[in-house]
């Protein structure tokens, strides 16, 4: 199993409707379940605890091959375009169990 966790810092402009943007992303990312082979779980949440990052994406994949397929999947690439309109910073970690 592979876990993929991404943290985004949103622009000041995007933070004006942070909850709305998070709700949009939650729906878009959840729609990938059953579409991207090997994607087992996915969720997006708004950070309420302060710090540098505003939004977190958490994904579980069956293996590294599934994660690689996700990265280039057209549905995921469309969501990335949306995220890039909001985000001004990003951190990511991936690990295998």
Image (spheres, helix red, strand yellow):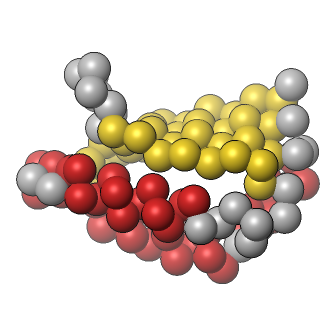
Q: Residue at x 85, y 56 (%)?
A: 38
Regarding residue 84, the answer to whether it shows in the image is: no
Q: Residue at x 77, y 49 (%)?
A: 40
| Residue placed most toward the observer, 49 or 33 | 33
Q: Residue at x 62, y 48 (%)?
A: 42
In the rendered image, residue 35, in percent from the top left (x then y), is placed at 74, 71
In this image, 60 relative to 89: left or right?
right
In the rendered image, residue 89, in percent from the top left (x then y), is placed at 35, 44
In this image, 1 relative to 19: left or right?
right
Q: Residue at x 30, y 67 (%)?
A: 85
Q: Quadrant of the N terminus?
A: top right
Residue 89 higher or lower than 70, as above or below: above
Residue 20 higher or lower than 96, as above or below: below
In this image, 16 relative to 75: left or right?
left
Q: How many marks?
A: 0
Q: Quadrant of the C terminus?
A: top right
Which image quarter: residue 13?
bottom left
| Residue placed most toward the observer, 39 or 65 | 39
| Residue placed most toward the observer, 86 or 34 | 34
Regarding residue 67, the answer to whether it shows in the image is: yes
Residue 69 higher or lower than 1, as above or below: below
Which image quarter: residue 84?
bottom left
In the rendered image, residue 95, in percent from the top left (x then y), is placed at 76, 29
In the rendered image, residue 46, in percent from the top left (x then y), is placed at 33, 39
């Amino acid at each position: 199993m592979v876990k993929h966790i991404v943290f985004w810092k949103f622009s000041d402009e995007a933070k004006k409707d942070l909850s709305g943007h998070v709700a949009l992303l939650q729906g878009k990312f959840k729609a990938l379940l059953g579409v991207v082979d090997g994607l087992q779980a996915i969720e997006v949440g708004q950070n309420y605890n302060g710090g540098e990052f505003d939004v977190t994406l958490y994904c579980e994949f069956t293996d590294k091959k599934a994660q690689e397929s996700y990265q280039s999947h057209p549905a995921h690439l469309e969501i990335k375009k949306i995220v890039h309109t909001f985000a001004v910073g990003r951190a990511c970690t991936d690990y295998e169990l």
